[in-house]
Amino acid sequence: MPLVVVPTPVGNMEDITLRALRALRGADLIACEDTRRTMKILSRYGIRTPLVSYHSFNEKERTRTLTERLSRGETVALVSDAGTPGISDPGYELIRSSLEAGFEIDVLPGATAFVPALLLSGFPPQPFLFEGFLPRRKGDRRRRLEELKSFSGSIVFYLSPHGPVKVLEDIHQVLGERPAVILREISKLHQERIPGSLASLQALLGEASLKGEMVLVTGPRPRWTEPENGYWQGVALGLCEQGLPDKEVVKRLSEEYGIAKNRVKQFLHSKRREKEGL
């Protein structure tokens, strides 16, 4: 198999499959985003296959070199720093060129960040839209968000550690208020789930220094006229878990969702009584 696309762990080094390790060992060459990051995996599992860098800055040039090696019958394993190459990381150019040239390609199943994030969000997984990283330029980003406004399901975004507040601000302004969850350190020891709303999460990111890439999942736009809908209750509980006083929770739910203050107070009181009764 000349080209093998190999997913690598997004956090925990043990989240790599036996088949992926076999593919890395059997390849003539491993094309990787950062040789230092990939070397940690290879050293962990005693793999000595040669490495060559393949990242966003040399993707087109390196694609030509790698397709030449594929044409000679060599096997190239393609990896990224974390997850599956070609999704939000380099790899698409090589995969497309290899398909056009008629080379055999295999894509191994494995680690991704958006699947566990979507399920941990608690929002309906069907339908959902994976958006990944939004455009860096504000104008391009807002135009893309305008295209997403009509989608009625859950949306998965990747947030870069560089300027996530500005990105979240645009998401909030264009998509409007809706429930949301931030997942960070996925698969790592200190994995964290932060529920709330786009407004509360925007405020949180503005105040706290959260390191690393994060996954943001937005739920469908709430229909507050439906009595069976429980989104605002989940948002209220999420704000309480963050340590906000009841007064602040009541204020935010009233301002951001139009929920009557007495209704929020009664809900929080009932939940407190349930907890005390355990």
Image (cartoon, rainbow, N blue to C red):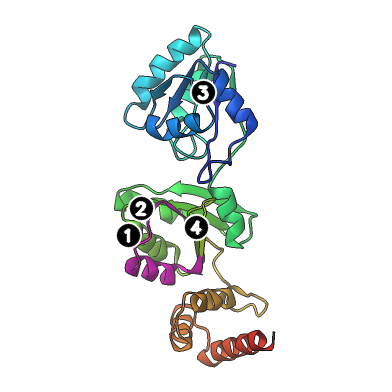
Q: Which of the marked residues, 4 or 2, is nearer the chain's N terminus?
A: 2
Q: Could you tell me how far apart the alpha carbons at marks 1 and 4 are, in whole angstroms? A: 25 Å
Residue placed under numbered mark 1 in the picture: 166
| Rendered position, 108 above or below 242 | above
Q: Could you tell me how far apart the alpha carbons at marks 4 and 2 are, in whole angstroms? A: 17 Å
| Rendered position, 96 above or below 65 | below
Q: Could you tell me how far apart the alpha carbons at marks 1 and 2 are, in whole angstroms? A: 11 Å
Question: Relative to residue 250, is residue 19 drawn left or right?
Answer: right
Q: What type is the residue that disc 1 sits on?
A: Lys
SS for callout 3: strand
Residue 264, horizontal then vertical, whole percent: 55, 87
| Rendered position, 265 above or below 129 | below
SS for callout 2: loop
Q: What type is the residue that disc 4 sits on?
A: His
Quarter where residue 225 is shown: bottom right
- Tag on residue 161? 2
Q: Could you tell me how far apart the alpha carbons at marks 3 and 1 are, in whole angstroms? A: 36 Å
Residue 207 falls within the magenta-colored stretch? yes
Q: Nearer the viewer, mark 3 or mark 4?
A: 4
Residue placed under numbered mark 4 in the picture: 190
Q: Could you tell me how far apart the alpha carbons at marks 2 and 3 are, in whole angstroms? A: 28 Å
Residue 201, horizontal then vertical, whole percent: 43, 68
SS for callout 4: loop
**225, 196: nearer the viewer:** 196
Mark 1 is surrounded, within 10 Å at the Cα level, by few (under 14), some (14 to 19) or many (20 or more) other residues, namely: some
Q: What type is the residue that disc 3 sits on?
A: Ala
Q: Which of the marked residues, 2 or 3, is nearer the chain's N terminus?
A: 3
- Tag on residue 202? none
Quarter where residue 31 is shown: top left
